[in-house]
Amino acid sequence: MTFVAASPYMQWAKTRSGSKYNLAVSGMENYSLRDLDVSIDDLEINGPSIYGYEPLQNALARRYQTDPDCVVAAIGTSLANHLAMAAILRPGDEVLIEQPVYELLLSTAYYLGAIVKRFSRRFEDGFQINTSEIKDLITPKTKLIIMTNLHNPSSVLTNESTLKEIAEITQGKCYVLVDEVYLETMFEQTPKSAFHLGENFISTNSLTKTYGLSGLRCGWILANKELAEKIWLLNDLFGVAAPHPAERLSVIALAELDKVGQRTKNLLTTNRKIINEFLDNQPKLSCVKVDFGTVVFPRLLKGNVSDLCQVLREKYETTVVPGDFFEMPNHFRLGICMNTSILIEGLERLSQALTEI
């Protein structure tokens, strides 16, 4: 395929997703600085950040019960994924990527010159991973397997037993990268990071999607010490060092995540009831319903999703993410993490647009 060094999805998200009733968002609405326990001293602009800011490294290591040397701080999950992939892959290396997948993961693999092979997460199977397909696809040339958990765009959980099967299939012969940016929307039911499954497992995450702390750009990679050091050195070509005020504020935010997360849990509990009732009563849609996550990924049973998106935006001031960005043009991704009043009104407008098309 012809590849352009850009992300079609991010271009769309930045320039065309905005609307009065934006149901395309996948991360919690912004958490305010005034709600964190900060002082002016916490905004100091200079500090000791060489290969990581030690208080932040330690805070993340404690959170994941690992050694700080296994933690690489990054500017958001997207750069975390890019750095992890770039540290492993060379042009011509083989990588297995789930389908459907978050577009940036696929675009980054092509940008790095990888030979991309796909394993399916089928709507008919509830978007679950078929480990037999991975076993059939993996070869001695496979350097990396990439997946999201919770799955983006469906929010489906890949359970520990499936991850252990993948560990058994790979037997440490290739890396497994698990993007876990939505996993903590499971709160007290959040399983251990896939990083703990073996030396060849890498996980990425951030404070953005679950906690609404996007402005801090606090992301991270968990990897074995040797790979973590390699990623730190690679980052010298990209970010060099993070903005120090963001590092300091991230340490404070990590200490207050229970409070910050409670806001998310309350909102998602309310909004999930609303979206499930909507889906139960909408005959033109079929959806794999889930108990966690910030998005759902319904299938349009009759009609054209492109037409739906156009009518929604132009007539109803409402936006959802077209399934084309996830290689499933009969689907669209719908966020449930916005203010409840926006969700209710947006779903009413979606219902009207479904009737119209």
Image (cartoon, rainbow, N blue to C red):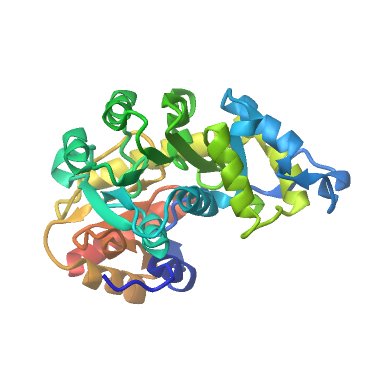
In the figure, is residue 210 to the left or right of 69?
Answer: left
Please tell me in which quadrant of the rendered image residue 135 appears: top left
* Vertical arrangement, residue 76 with respect to residue 302, above or below: above
Could one spot residue 29 in this view of the protein? no
Q: Residue at x 85, y 52 (%)?
A: 46
In the figure, is residue 146 to the left or right of 287?
Answer: right
Q: Residue at x 44, y 52 (%)?
A: 26
Q: Position of residue 35 (x, y in %)?
A: 71, 42
Q: Residue at x 33, y 34 (%)?
A: 157
Q: Position of residue 242 (x, y in %)?
A: 70, 52
In the figure, is residue 1 to the left or right of 304?
Answer: right
Q: How many marks?
A: 0
Q: Nearer the viewer, residue 8 or 141?
A: 141
* Vertical arrangement, residue 257 with respect to residue 208, above or below: above
Give the residue furthest to the front. Answer: 140
Task: Specify the quadrant that holds the C terminus.
Answer: bottom left
Could one spot residue 276 in this view of the protein? yes
Q: Residue at x 37, y 47 (%)?
A: 295
Task: Specify the quadrant that holds the N terminus.
Answer: bottom left
In the figure, is residue 19 to the left or right of 157?
Answer: right
Q: Position of residue 60 (x, y in %)?
A: 63, 33
Q: Nearer the viewer, residue 305 or 270?
A: 305
Q: Nearer the viewer, residue 276 or 54?
A: 54
Q: Nearer the viewer, residue 339 or 333?
A: 333
Q: Position of residue 195 (x, y in %)?
A: 46, 31
Give the residue furthest to the right. Answer: 41
